[in-house]
């Protein structure tokens, strides 16, 4: 009879223990950057946050952040809960007509101002993730992204 009690006690205790050890929580911080060359005090700046080549410039896989534009000149943006040490790339555009889309002209060229988190290597193609990515560190200086237009 004691064996049965010990066996039941063992299994009931085993059920209360976690199946695996908890994963350590990665430290997070807030990414702060400025967007320069905002020419119109209207619309929304849409920021896509990407973590890999596989999700880069895929709207469905991006973390999207929308910031209403109220002043021309410089717009300061903060994105919380960014994992410290993680590689990121940013793609953004100023949705001047506030239709939620990145508008292009008849030839497929951007008709709204845009920017990336790194320096473009070639103006005639979209950048690659590794060309515009950066490692997020809380001690890094504030980035400045400058909106561009095709023309």
Image (cartoon, rainbow, N blue to C red):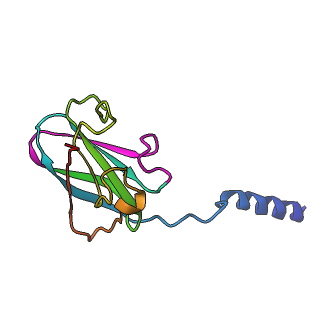
The question of residue 117 being in magenta is answered with no
The percent coordinates of residue 97 (x first, y second) are 21, 29
The question of residue 68 being in magenta is answered with yes
The percent coordinates of residue 101 (x first, y second) are 32, 33
Residue visible at 22% across and 51% down in the picture? 77
Residue numbers of the magenta segment? 54-74
The percent coordinates of residue 32 (x first, y second) are 23, 58
Query: In the shown orientation, is residue 59 left or right of residue 1?
Result: left
Residue visible at 61% across and 66% down in the picture? 21
| Image quadrant in which the C terminus is located | top left
Residue visible at 28% across and 58% down in the picture? 31
Question: 141 or 72, which lies in front?
Answer: 72
| Image quadrant in which the N terminus is located | bottom right
Question: 47 or 16, which lies in front?
Answer: 47
Farthest-out residue, bottom: 139
Farthest-out residue, right: 1
The percent coordinates of residue 71 (x first, y second) are 9, 42
Residue visible at 21% across and 68% down in the picture? 141
Query: In the shown orientation, is residue 29 left or right of residue 34?
Result: right
């Amino acid at each position: 009879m004691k064996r049965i009690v010990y066996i039941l006690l063992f299994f009931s205790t085993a059920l209360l223990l976690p199946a695996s050890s908890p994963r350590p929580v990665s430290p997070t911080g807030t990414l702060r950057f400025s967007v320069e060359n905002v020419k119109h005090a209207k619309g929304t700046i849409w920021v896509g946050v990407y973590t890999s080549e596989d999700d880069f410039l895929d709207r469905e896989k991006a973390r999207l952040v929308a910031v209403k534009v109220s002043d021309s000149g410089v717009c300061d943006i903060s994105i919380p809960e960014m994992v410290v040490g993680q590689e990121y790339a940013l793609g953004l555009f100023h949705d001047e007509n506030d239709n939620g889309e990145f508008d292009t002209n008849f030839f497929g060229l951007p008709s709204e101002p845009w920017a990336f988190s790194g320096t473009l290597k070639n103006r005639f193609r979209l950048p690659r993730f590794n060309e515009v990515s950066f490692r997020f560190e809380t001690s890094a200086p504030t980035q400045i992204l400058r909106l561009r237009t095709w023309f």
